[in-house]
Image (cartoon, rainbow, N blue to C red):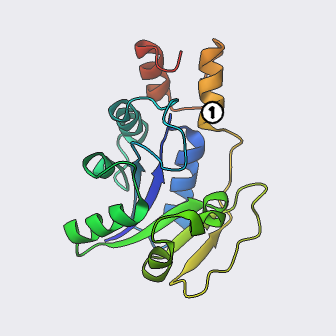
Amino acid sequence: MRVGLYFGSFNPIHHGHLLIASYVLQNTNLQQVWFVVSPQNPLKPAATLLNEYHRLHLVQLAIEGANDLRASDIEFRLPKPSYTANTLAYLQEKYPSHEFSIIMGSDSFQNLPKWKNADWLLRNYPIYVYKRPGHLNLPVYEGAKEIHELAAPLLPISSTDVRKHIREGETIRYLVPEAVREDIEKNRYYS
């Protein structure tokens, strides 16, 4: 099976994340997209993160009923902070018949040289890059296996904005799936 790994904090997941995953499935040869919920991104502060199990549950609510989308807690069982190279090595061992690719925004792609074992990732895994404003020109990395540029439609939504709306008592209806909104409000997450 050809699987695209969409790594992120998903703090919380929103319609922008889902739109990108849907676009990737419809416009590439990938058969599934796995939302890999990162308990701790080594390049981001952990202070604003909701508990990883709550974030995973919100992803599960968001993709309920979609057979080609999956929520993954694989990084919960790996050493923290989470490094993509470690996760891919583990997944390749656990699922030897799967072909894994990485899905990322152009902003992350430009920061790839800062990642642990970046050269190994580039040589061994196809990368699907969706362009984000302010990061439209992609760097060329020597020896990369496959880099696919995607013109995925982007929504001007961020998890930071969603959290800000919640803190300020504003609605997040239409920013996140309804089941996600209900769970966030019921459990008073981010407020």
The residue beneath circle 1 is 160
Q: Position of residue 3 (x, y in %)?
A: 38, 66
Above or below, 20 against 126 in this view is above
Q: Secondary structure at mark 1?
A: helix
Above or below, 45 against 36 in this view is above
Above or below, 14 against 98 in this view is above
Q: Position of residue 104 (x, y in %)?
A: 56, 60
Q: Position of residue 76 (x, y in %)?
A: 29, 45
Could one spot residue 174 in this view of the protein?
A: no
Above or below, 170 against 133 in this view is above
**Left or right of 155 in this view: 101:** left
Write the residue at 44% across / 70% down.
101
Residue at the bottom extreme, as displayed: 143
**Where does the N terminus fall, quadrant-wise?**
bottom left
Write the residue at 47% across / 47% down.
41
Q: Quadrant of residue 162?
A: top right
